[in-house]
Amino acid sequence: MLDGGAGNVKADDVPVGLVTRRVLLVDDDVHVSRALARVLRRFCEVEIASSVEDAERYLAQDARFDLILCDLILPERGGLDLYRGLVAQGSTLARRIAFMTGLGDDAPEAEECREVPCLGKPLDITRVHALLDAFS
């Protein structure tokens, strides 16, 4: 599921003083979300949304995210829809989004938004680190 090992890390395992970066993870697959969140919580705070609608609710309440990792293809509205909505709102979060997909790094579905990074599954955690460093 993930490159880089999942481990058994809980949110409480990360010292509060070290959690400075926040990631919004948007994926309808609960197993992928949990595994990825477990890895990400080693070095950042993670919120999980199971749909674009859930993600929009999170962002309406608190937009302080360093990175939004959004599955490109979701049942109703996908990553492109979330991205387009952020662009239409003039949100700076549009520059902090990256797509995830089981179709690989060069997914044809992401072709129209080549300015948005696209990470193939299984995710390479070093690429997630690099995105966090670039966006923070």
Image (spheres, rainbow, N blue to C red):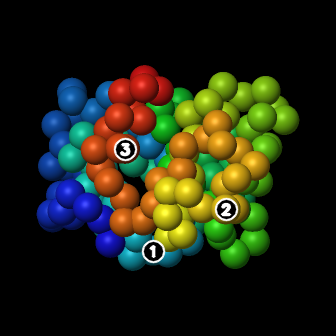
Q: Callout 2: 10 Å neighbours few (<14), some, many (20+)?
A: few
Residue where numbered disc 1 is placed: 30
Counting residues from the start of the chain, the first of labels 3 and 2 encountered is 2
In front: mark 3 or mark 2?
Answer: 2
Residue where numbered disc 3 is placed: 128
Query: Is disc 3 in contact with disc 1, using a CB cutoff of under 8 Å?
Result: no
| Residue situated in front as seen by the camera: 66 or 120 | 120
Residue 125 position within the rendered picture, expressed as x and y whole percent measured from the top left: 30, 50
In this rendering, the answer to whether 75 lies above or below 89 is below
Residue 4 position within the rendered picture, expressed as x and y whole percent measured from the top left: 20, 57
Is any part of residue 59 visible from this angle?
Answer: no
Mark 3 and mark 2: span between their CA atoms?
A: 21 Å
Residue 21 position within the rendered picture, expressed as x and y whole percent measured from the top left: 37, 32
Secondary structure under tag 1 reads helix
Q: Quadrant of the N terminus?
A: bottom left
Residue pictured at 18% horizontal, 62% vertical:
5
What is the three-letter code of the residue carrying label 3? Val
Counting residues from the start of the chain, the first of labels 2 and 1 encountered is 1
Residue pictured at 16% horizontal, 37% vertical:
15
Q: Is residue 91 left or right of residue 23?
A: right
Counting residues from the start of the chain, the first of labels 3 and 1 encountered is 1
Mark 2 and mark 1: span between their CA atoms?
A: 24 Å
Residue pictured at 69% horizontal, 40% vertical:
60
Residue where numbered disc 2 is placed: 108
| Residue situated in front as seen by the camera: 91 or 116 | 116
What is the three-letter code of the residue carrying label 1? Val
In this rendering, the answer to whether 18 lies above or below 82 is above
